[in-house]
Image (cartoon, rainbow, N blue to C red):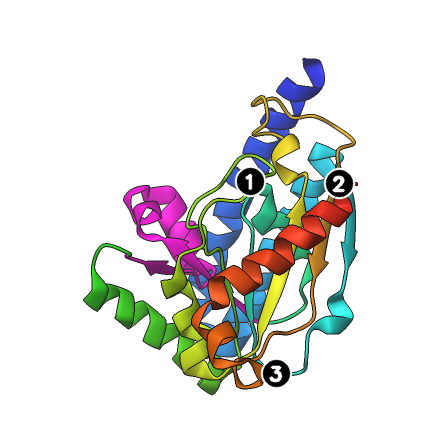
Amino acid sequence: MIFDIVSKIRFGLSLIALWFRLIFAEIQKKRMSEEAYFFKILSIAKKHTRKIIAVTRMDLVVEGLENIPDEPVVYMGNHQSYIDIYVTVNALQRKLCLIGKKEIEKIPIVAYLAREMSVLFLDRENSREGLKTILEAIRRMKEERFDVLIYPEGTRSKRLEMGEFHKGSFKIPQKAHAPIIPMVVNNAYRVFEDNYRVTPHIPVQLAFLPPVRFEELSEEEAKNIDELVKGQIAEKLKEFNK
């Protein structure tokens, strides 16, 4: 109980510190190149993620980084918890663009933080706006060599079992001719969302699987790419939970 309260206070203080660091960085923005500003923001974000990982005292293990090729990729992962984003940003040393759900824009402070950290919002209810987001993500991949992170479930499952994967999420790697890196997070929901108390020493695994390339798939596999990637993630989850 005490650990839970203290952890939540420390989490809140870290968010406030993140907020002020981003504001200070924005003040300096005019004196920096676009790329320098991005890496400044990335450094701030990573400091925050490291803090949260330390605050929760999770036992984090990352594997499969060697599976990520030296080219822009699209990470497709299961989405158990808010913690997923923290452990992923902390693990990757690359330019990363997260695709978030449109509803986040309705929360002013969160929306501001998200925009400063290069998040794009996907409106699944408006096909025209959704296409704009997809095209912007592809542009960033091709012109600025960003990786893209998207959760095909569209929302947190808050449990081990996955929800349905939205097939539209796969338009980005398909149109960008980019490899998909299936990404697996295990046990992240148990850190907080399982009972809404911060639980220490939860063993959290983050795994990056070998790339999936559209050009190497059969017509049938490409047609059912959502099930193929979901199946690979499910197999790894099963392996983690033997």
Mark 2 surroundings within 10 Å by alpha-carbon count, few (fewer than 14), some (14 through 19), many (20 or more): few
Q: Position of residue 47 (x, y in %)?
A: 66, 52
Q: Which residues are magenta?
A: 95-123
Of 186 and 215, which appears nearest the observer? 215
Marks 3 and 2 in Cβ contact (< 8 Å): no
Q: Residue at x 20, y 59 (%)?
A: 126
User: Which dot marks residue 241?
Assistant: 2
Q: Amino acid at mark 3?
A: Glu
Asked whether the viewer can see residue 30, the reply is: no
Q: Amino acid at mark 1?
A: Ser
Asked whether the viewer can see residue 57, the reply is: yes
Of 167 and 34, which appears nearest the observer? 167
| Gap between marks 2 and 1 measured at Cα | 17 Å
Q: Amino acid at mark 2?
A: Asn
Q: Which residue is mark 1?
A: 81
Q: Position of residue 33 (x, y in %)?
A: 48, 79
As drawn, which residue projects farthest toward the front? 220
Q: Position of residue 206 (x, y in %)?
A: 70, 52
Q: Which residue is mark 3?
A: 71
| Gap between marks 1 and 3 measured at Cα | 28 Å
Q: Nearer the viewer, mark 2 or mark 1?
A: 2
